[in-house]
Image (spheres, grey):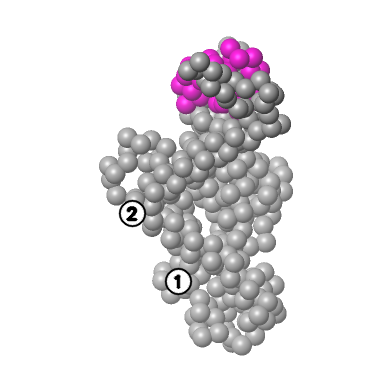
Amino acid sequence: MRWSRSKGSLLPDASAGPPRVEPGGGRLRLLHARTRLVLRSFRNGAAVFLESRIGLLALVIIVLFAVMALSHPVLMGTVWDADIYDPVTGYAFDATEQPAPPSWKHPLGTDPLGRDVLSQLLFSTGSEFVLGITAALVTVAIATTVGAVSAYYGGLVDAFFMRLADLIIALPSISLLIVLSGLFDLSLFYLALVIGVLGGFGGTAIVLKSQALSIKVRPFIDAARMTGGGQFRIIFVHIVPNLLPLSLLYMMFTVTSAIFAEAVLSFLGLLDIRMSWGIMIHTANTGGYLLSGTRYWWLVLPAGASITFLCSAFYLAGRALDEVVNPRLSRRDG
């Protein structure tokens, strides 16, 4: 709009016509502003996370295991012979006695069936990542939605979901998974779904619902309601995004629970999985090698140490993320 000076005051110039409004310009500017806020929040959170020594340690361990998972298909395609190094059907023809101790060709030795332990370890790493991340995503999606809906509606809706959560918490998860594995053939994917559903409708939903209650009473929720925002929009546009930082925190803890649950069920021989760390220990136990002390250490130690370190890494990552989600904890401990 152009302006003209008349009698010492500024008046709009009528000859310039009405102001030109670009279609969608307001929405684009709003989207740009929101994107900048999200990026700034992410940068601040990343800075707090990297200042934590336990966060850095967890990140290093997780990256190391990710490299292990990615290295297996590369080695199988370039260096290793599938007839020898396949984690399920391979056989070490160069070894005269099985299980064979570590050697140059088999750095972690072979198992009682003549399969390379290092190949099994690397192959199982990818499976554990798929299991943990899938279970965590399912848990976060369900728990965030349930928590937001329960907090917003209250009443019977809240009572139903919270009593369901109490029931799931009261049931021992490992015992329930053992029963389910006896009734159904649980593959890696279906195990992840079961763990994710149990976690999503269980304790995580209660925690997120408590956080959603504090968000529900904030002024911007009242403003959205007064401007005509529908229930669906208020829940999924205003409440759920503010729950995501806490959801990400509990996502890390779910990964740890999923990996541990898979190890226990595989050790008991209850899962329909080609290879995993738990199956490696199960194979050693079936052959009676767990009772031989440290003589056949390579059959148990690599898989057991991998379960311990990866579960610990995601737990420590959750502890570091707790400092990001709850600023009062920042710089309180290492």
- Against 167, residue 43 (above or below) is below
**Residue position for label 2:** 53
Q: Is disc 1 surrounded by few (<14), some (14 to 19) or many (20+) residues within 10 Å?
A: some
Residue at image coords 59%, 35%: 29
Magenta-colored stretch includes residue 214: yes
Magenta-highlighted residues: 211-239
Q: Position of residue 222 (x, y in %)?
A: 53, 15
User: Foreground mark, 2 or 1?
Assistant: 2
Q: Please tell me which residue lies in front, 269 or 29.
A: 29
Residue at the extreme left: 332
Q: Position of residue 196 (x, y in %)?
A: 61, 40
Residue at image coords 67%, 69%: 88
- Against 262, residue 140 (above or below) is above
**Residue position for label 1:** 297
Q: Is disc 2 surrounded by few (<14), some (14 to 19) or many (20+) residues within 10 Å?
A: some
Instruction: Report helix, strand or loop for mark 1.
Output: helix
Magenta-colored stretch includes residue 128: no
Residue at the extreme front: 7
Q: Quadrant of residue 162?
A: top right
Q: Name which residue type carries label 2.
A: Arg
Q: Please tell me which residue lies in front, 3 or 299.
A: 3
Nearer-N-terminus badge (2/1): 2
Q: Position of residue 283 (x, y in %)?
A: 58, 65
Q: Name which residue type carries label 1.
A: Trp
Marks 2/1: CA–CA distance: 31 Å
**Residue 170 in sight here:** no
